Amino acid sequence: MEKNQLWEKAAAFHGHVCGGLAIGYRAALYAMELLELDFSEDEEVVCVTENDACGVDAIQSILGCSVGKGNLLFRLRGKQVFSFFNRKTGKSVRLSLKPLEIPHEEKLEFLLKSSAQELFDVGEVSFQLPEQARIFSSQPCAKCGELTAEPYLHLENGIYLCPDCWHPYKRFL
């Protein structure tokens, strides 16, 4: 797919055009170039995003990363930073948006027309490639009865409780 088609695809998925979407769009294109990526049918491409902003929609639509497939993970830090992994090659890259000192009304055009090198700092990923998604059994919470995936259940007084019903021990911070 050509760049213009990918931009249109991202905009249609997101619902409108904005600077945040352009950041994710440019990050996805740059990651494709640096890591030789294509649309991920399964979990070949992994993105760990440090934000939950508009740009994540571009990454989903362009690279096929999604929470449901297990290849879009959130490491929320409030930063316009995206770490990408290519499971086939083992390569990874961390893209961090550089500070932009341009008027707001010029931002979208600047994001779409500037070189990727002008927009992003390229670095090494500081954590390991997350494991592939696993399927877990679910059990009912002993208090509310809602099914909860086993890794999220907590043992309290001999019964298993979901995170909402569990009372963590907070005496020592």
Image: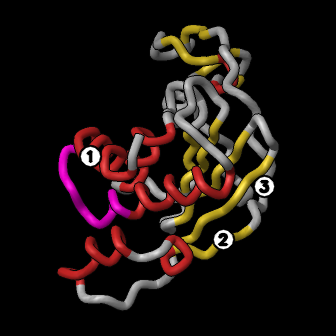
Which residue is denoted by mark 1 in the rendering?
8
- Contact between marks 2 and 1 (CB within 8 A): the answer is no
* Amino acid type at mark 2: Val
Q: Is residue 18 magenta?
A: yes
* Amino acid type at mark 3: Phe
Query: CA gap, disc 1 to disc 3?
Result: 33 Å
Which residue is denoted by mark 3 in the rendering?
127
- Where does the magenta region start and end? 15-22
Return the residue nearer the eye: 146 or 66: 66
Query: CA gap, disc 2 to disc 1?
Result: 26 Å
Can the viewer see residue 156 in this picture? no
Which residue is denoted by mark 2 in the rendering?
122
- 126 with respect to 143 (left or right): right
Element carrying mark 3: loop
Label 3 neighbour load within 10 Å: few <14, some 14-19, many 20+ = few
Q: Residue at x 40, y 39 (%)?
A: 61
Q: Is residue 17 magenta?
A: yes
Quadrant of image for the N terminus: top left
Residue mark closest to the camera, 1 vs 3: 1
Q: Earlier in the sequence, mark 1 or mark 3?
A: 1
Q: Position of residue 67 (x, y in %)?
A: 51, 33
* Amino acid type at mark 1: Glu
